Amino acid sequence: MKSNWKTTKMLGLMMLANFLIYIAVEVSRSYGQGQDINKRRRLTTKKFWKKPESSPAFWNREQERLDDIYFLPLANGSEAPRDFRGIPRWLNHMSSCKPDSRVTTEIEDFKSLPQRFQDFLLYMGCRSYPLIMDAPKVCSEPPYLLLAVKSIAPHFDRRQAIRESWGRAGIFDGERIATVFLLGTTAATDHFPDFSDMVKHEAALYGDVLQWDYRDTFFNLTLKEVLFLEWFGSHCASAKYVFKCDDDVFVNTQHMLAYLGNFSVSKTKEIFIGDVITNAGPHRTRHLKYYIPESLFRGIYPPYAGGGGYLYSGSLGLRLRMISRLVTLYPIDDVFTGMCLKRLGLVPEKHMGFKTFDIEEKHRENPCAYKSLILVHPRSPQDMIKIWSWINDPKAKCCIKTTLDTKGAMPSSKCK
């Protein structure tokens, strides 16, 4: 019995010794790891990103401010460079908008800029304008293709020609097509007559007019873009595709439908195609339409589709709606859309069927030249109706030598 007790005591002492050794080893290991952690911490006392030097151009500075708040990762807490002037006014959903007096002092040459730039810059932060003319029935049934046409109040003849030709709403090849026209208001200050009653009558007659209460100018086309995206997200989010264009283009709607029918389900999610322009930058010649002063923007434009028209998926339209809220308005709308795509990590795809700078003059009266194209710019209302009758003539025969993705060759009207 005494021997058993001694054995038990010995085993207990051995277990205690092993336990103490284990504790000592773990403490030593933890101490060593702590030293390693401290060493690693000393290696990362600097930020893991570097903020680019601030640009002297106003748009760049405004966008840098948004990037600081919403995009760039932060490091070391309060040491991260941030501008706390507040979130953009358009994200506050303010009901009224006043001119931003900052621009008069933050842009050195503000007073010498053309009036259109002064007007744009003063109201650059305004994005909430009331919808004074709605089109509630346009998307009462989700369309396969939504044609969104940028227009202005005086252009009734263009809108009517589109309704009677390529923009005719209805069922085509088993797919539903809807058309909506996007308008602002024409102001007496821009020497326009009063078109308000005419637009009201047109909207009541056709039910396809969207009009917002803002001044419809060239620089406000970007505003029209973001207002449409907001309307789209709220009223027509189930549309599978969106075709956004000007009111002076001809569109081969049938060919567009055939083109879309070739897409796989996976590709349709992020499709954005048009006449893509790359490696472009702002024009600095003051008298040009697309002139941009250095005090407003510096840099190279991202790839963008020419504003005559472009096609994108409805799902991408919803993403554009969200990201556009975090991109500072830019006075050229198609460049602004390219900036939004860049934020999404996307590049628009060039399609040779988009002829935003027209086709060769020798082909313009050839009915077969339009069979394999998606868009041609510019065309008058009379041209739209004429070309539409050409491509829908059952007696017309064309030897189409191009594929559906259109490599650029022109078809011949002479078939052997």
Image (cartoon, grey):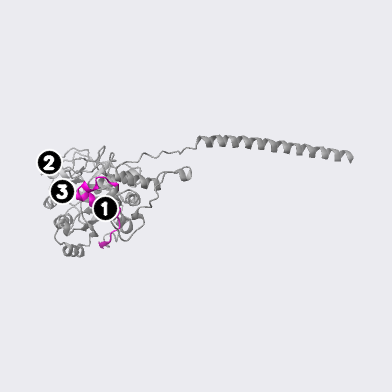
Specify which label sits upstream in the sequence, 1 or 3: 1
Residue at screen point 89% across, 40% down: 2
Q: Is residue 68 visible?
A: yes
Q: Are marks 1 and 2 in contact (CB under 8 Å)?
A: no
Quadrant where the N terminus is found in the figure: top right
Q: Is 394 included in the stretch rendered in magenta?
A: no
Residue at screen point 49% across, 37% down: 45
Query: Residues under labels 1 and 2: Cα distance?
Result: 45 Å
Q: Alpha-carbon neighbours of circle 3 within 10 Å: few (<14), some, or many (≥20)?
A: some
Q: Nearer the viewer, residue 334 or 283?
A: 283
**Pointer 3 residue:** 391
Q: Which segment is the magenta one?
A: 106-132
**Pointer 1 residue:** 122
Q: Nearer the viewer, residue 407 or 394?
A: 407
Amino acid residing under circle 1:
Leu
Specify which label sits upstream in the sequence, 1 or 2: 1
Q: Secondary structure at mark 2?
A: helix
The mark lying in front, picked from 1 and 3, is: 1
On residue 416, the disc is none
**Pointer 2 residue:** 363
Q: Are marks 1 and 3 in contact (CB under 8 Å)?
A: no
At which x and y percent is residue 315? Answer: 34, 50
Quadrant where the C terminus is found in the figure: top left
Amino acid residing under circle 2:
His
